Amino acid sequence: MKLSPSLLSANFANLERDIKELENNGIEMLHVDVMDGHFVPNITIGPVVLQSIRKITDLELDVHLMISNPGQYIKAFADAGADILTIHSEADIHLHRTLSMIKEMGIKAGVSINPSTPLFMVEEIAEIIDLLLIMSVNPGFGGQSFIEKSLEKIYKADQMRKNRKLDFLIEVDGGIKPSNSSKVLNAGADILVAGSAIFKGRNICENINLFNDFVKMDSKQ
């Protein structure tokens, strides 16, 4: 299991403290949600904040662009320090071109699909992506409940990957918590994005250990 904690749920008055605690508890990747108030009904951070985060950590920055016209902002986020840039299939009519642009910047390219978007919408660009992000809630806000139908989509994505001998990673974002982490992993996911479940109560170490405990428990059954 690889956890990518969503900074959307972190304490923005003490981001450096929270990030250092994640590092100290074995986290290797940070999920940075970028929202524009247009593609999703919320506004979060931009390249300036990402650049500040890059200065305080060497962790892999997994940047999720929930924005309209993402192609206009690829260079800004790449220059700010993103290691992975994920754009939404629903937000870009020239998906292949924008994903190719990301890869030309020397960083990993990801594509995301919303709960109502069928998997076949990304089949034509599957060969060029490094990551497929499957949304298991409707994007825009943290703390939502996992949509169970997402398990079927995760499984189908994993089967497509195997059948076509591709090596993109499958990431799942939305409603992830210790109690459902194992079934998401068993469906084929590689990376779990968790926000509220990691930062709730501000006991980051204990919450990460809960994820590890549930996965270990499942592996023994």
Image (cartoon, rainbow, N blue to C red):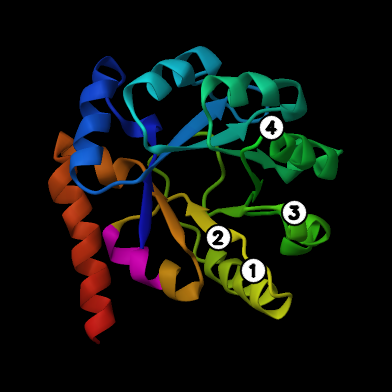
At x 35%, y 41%, the residue is 195
The picture places residue 29, in percent across and down from the top left corner, at 39, 43
- Quarter the N terminus occupies: bottom left
Q: Given the image, on which type of amino acid does mark 3 rest?
A: Ile
Quadrant assignment for the C terminus = bottom left
Q: Which residue is mark 1?
A: 157
| Callout in the foreground (2, 3) | 3
- Using the numbered discs, state the Cα–Cα distance from disc 1 to disc 3 in whole angstroms: 15 Å
At x 25% / y 39%, what residue is drawn?
Answer: 23
Which residue, as the protein is rendered here, is positioned at the far top? Answer: 48
Alpha carbon separation for disc pair 2 and 1: 8 Å
Tell which tag, 3 or 4, sits nearer the viewer.
Answer: 4
- Counting residues from the start of the chain, the first of labels 3 and 4 encountered is 4
Residue in front for this viewpoint, 129 or 40: 129
Real-space Cα separation, disc 2 to disc 3, in angstroms: 14 Å
The correct choice, above or below, for 38 with respect to 192 in the image is above
Q: Are marks 4 and 1 in contact (CB under 8 Å)?
A: no
Closer to the N terminus: mark 1 or mark 3? 3
The range drawn in magenta is: 178-183
